[in-house]
Amino acid sequence: VDAGTFNVIGRDDFAPTHFSTRTAGGWLTIQTSALTLRYQVGSGPFGTRNLQVSLRAGAQPVTAEPWASEVPPSCAIGVLCEAENLSLNGVSVANDHTGYTGTGFAAGFQSTGNSLSFQVTVATAGTYQFDARYANSVGGDGQNTTRTLTVAADGGAGATLTMPATADWNTWAIVSADLTLAAGTHTITVTRTAADSGNVNLDSVALVTPGAAYPSPPPPTGHDCAFGTVCEAESGTLAGGAALASDHNDYSGAGFVAGLATGASDTVPVTGVPVAGTYALQVRYANAQSAARPVSVQVGSAAATTASLATTSSWDSWRTVAVPVQLAAGANDVTIGCPDAGSCQLNLDTVAVTRSGATLLAPHAPLGGYRRGLDGVDGSAVTTPGLLYQDGWSLLDDTSSALYNPATRKVTPRPSHNGKPYQDGYVFGYGHDYARGLTDLATLTGPSELLPRWSYGVWYSEYYNHTAADYENTILPAFRANETPLDVLVTDTDFKSPSTWDGWEMNPSEFPDPKAFFDWSAAQGLHNALNIHPSIGSDDPQFARAQATADGGLTLNSGDYVFDWGNPAQLKAYLDLHNGFQQAGADIYWLDWCCDQSSSSLAGVTPDAWINQQYADYTAANLGRGFAFSRAYGSLQAGGYSGQQGLPTGPWADKRTTVHFTGDTTSDWATLKFEVGYTPGESSSTGLSAVSDDIGGFNNDGTQTTGAEPGSTREADDLYARWVQFGTFQPVDRLHGNHSDRLPWQYGTAAQASAEKFLNLRENLVPYTYTLAQQASRTGIPVVRPLYLQYPDAQDAYAQDGAEYLYGPNVLVAPVTTPGTGSVSTSVWFPPGSSWTDYFTGQTYAGGTTASVSTDLGSMPVFIKSGGIMTTRTDDVSNDEQNPLTKVTVTVAGGANGSFGMYEDNGTTTDTKQSAVTRISSSGAGHITRIAAIDGSFAGQVSQRQWTMRFLGVAAAPGAVTINGRAAPASAWSWDAATHALTVTAPAQSVHQPLTVSYR
């Protein structure tokens, strides 16, 4: 379809690219200066057999994987077809039970419309028997009962598959139904219709003649691995407990080999070795243990050798290494095993054999991933792959997305194509220039839009029944008394009336005068978010009006009425319910989800993305820059409350308007550690920059103690302090918890001091963070970045992506995720090509090295790249909105030249011309930093500014300091021997006057 869609709003914004095409031998070749794509003409849907991509920047050719919505694959009569290999819609592949065949099973069928499809060709017309191998035990709805699905051919009348309960989820049974088919090719679909109960797992299916036995699966066999190609480790012959698994992320293929313990092995037949000699066995593995682990490598019956595989930062992080092997010419069986009892426990993803010294081959493995929420996550979660893949290309499938006109905000269905199958999508070929891939994604589908400036400060939220009096008389005075900043108050669900869950008025006993409360908030420089659940009770004073506006269309579900946001009248009724809050002065709404069933009937538009855009448009009337604060990417009706199952229209549209509330996590160290890698992984896989985790976590893990407020709990001091440190360097810093202490003064002395220090640092970082967010809206490069985004050729960048990340291009953050109230050591890898200076201590580390960095609760591992520049407020303030940026500190890490452009506007404008940039440059060799005159203007711009320069890595006290070419008085500068930092404060001057500071 030659048109834009709800996903794709910038398809005509690319500069023209020269390309050539030719057709030879039945293959169409399209070639640009960077990429060659080959497609076998007339061969049907894109897949491994007919689509090839070659990146021309020295990368190896790769064979395309099929798109998720590929026209259903074919199955032959009388042959078992593995369900996990068929076309799945809203159904995930899993292998977390036993007894299945193949590599897994199709899991769930939890929502109406979930389906499995395949094609079959029958020679003669007649009645055929459809069989499915299923498991049915206690489902997500808590029931253990007979379940149903519907099987149909070519969209015709269906037959019911009635599936009695099996003993457990590891026990499988066969269900059958008859289908009448004409001669020819048919599409068979198994669907959970509105009349079905679903909640089953399907292992395999088959179409057979009536009465025939269920086909047996083919015996598992290893697959040859051709010399010089990347091969899946699981395609080898597994023995001794080694098994396929998929419970971690960023693997290629169907999964990875787990359980590599004593006696376990993976034998890979390598073919095409040119001559006998020494070669490199490239192994991609994960080792999230405390130390390196050995593996044995044996070729044929020769003596085994061992290799030591270094650690990776998590089980979602992978490293590729080359191990020398002696091979004969031709074919060799290479066995990877464990030499010692209990000393391995590695996960293997891919193998390849190349010439010694050859460039490491990259697999088609996703980098980062997303999921609707992290609700209930406790240390790990499976995610859905997004844009970035390690071998440098991906396919964005847009087949399901509705057509869309951004000017009118109207969606329309796609044309029918006379019922014929088709695909619509975009090939990204970025090589290792992952940043270019994200920039192109932003051009095609729109970037994460810049939020109001106040949203980059400090948020306070707690699931606790706080009243207006609490905020006015206790909470905010405590913030002020403890000199701790606050920008956003988030009020959770208990403020509502008549129902505290989904009422649509503020409880008069708790908020007697809503407008006065919001006026008070605004006078204090605060903004407000209110928790919303998307349903309404019949006893709500607003119900009659809402039902009338909805033309009587609101439907009863579990005792309350819910909305179809795809229906214009019901959407208006829903948004009108917010008018009372909006007129009183609320700023934004936290669309929370639990037990409600509101949805959108719009085909081709993910419900989350649709309602989130409506919230952005609705709040823009007051804010200028409106946005949604919500879960993202899916819907309750597809993928569950927080499920990882991705939808085609989810991440690409949702990222434009949404602050992603990632849900109710567990308050423990394991979850904090997981989030370190999750935020940059989500941002890089989707382009959504504004990710908001619960800082402090939400749900108690049983280790909490009695809190300061009645009925509340508190986590350990060190966990709280380290979580606050982590939040300081996140896209959105939002303290939150479930009746849990989240305020610094509710903790011990050291934790309180730490939290107050880092919350002030977060506030002072707003000028830097706001600039990064504006860059994200312009370039698609998110605020928080995985290491591989800037260091794609360093294996450590992939191996360490679960433990450290970049905050902008020049700030390395390695949050502490291990307990300890005293000094705690954190292993930090420093990317190559530059030195890195500790922001707090001034110690400098060489790039390309790893060091153990010790910090107590008063510090954390944060480093600035040589030549890097960071701008912060000089003085602590109570909030950003009421404190013009008249004093700025520029922190410069020596050792290289650098530059930075600090972006400013009035904080809410949508006019890009109403903005200004102050360009800052530094000379590492000359010890000179120049601040140019401000470029641009906007309403409310300050006229004068005092600049303080903080030079890091200054080994000794300077002999002279100059400001604008004149010797600076001794009172204007100081050198700290302990931190090797030189601080120079210049007199206040016009923002239109340049400034130069140097030292020698």
Image: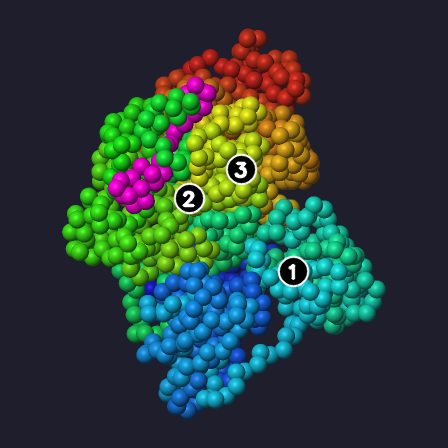
Cα separation, mark 3 vs mark 2, equals 23 Å
User: On the picture, is 610 further left or further right than 286?
Assistant: left
Cα separation, mark 1 vs mark 3, equals 34 Å
In the rendered structure, which segment of residues is drawn in magenta? 480-503
The quadrant of the image that shows the N terminus is bottom left
Mark 2 lies on a secondary structure that is: strand
**913 or 249, nearer to the observer:** 249
484 inside magenta stretch: yes
Furthest toward the right, the residue is: 303
Residue 258's label in the rendered image is: 1
Three-letter residue code for mark 3? Gln
Residue sitting at 53 percent across and 73 percent down? 172
Badge nearest the viewer, 1 or 3: 3
Residue sitting at 57 percent across and 44 percent down? 670
The quadrant of the image that shows the C terminus is top right
Three-letter residue code for mark 2? Phe
Q: Are marks 2 and 1 in contact (CB under 8 Å)?
A: no
Which callout, 1 or 3, points at the residue further toward the start of the chain?
A: 1
Crowd rating for badge 1 (residues with CA inside 10 Å; few <14, some 14–19, many 20+): many
Q: Which residue is mark 3?
A: 704
Three-letter residue code for mark 1? Ala
Residue 661's label in the rendered image is: 2
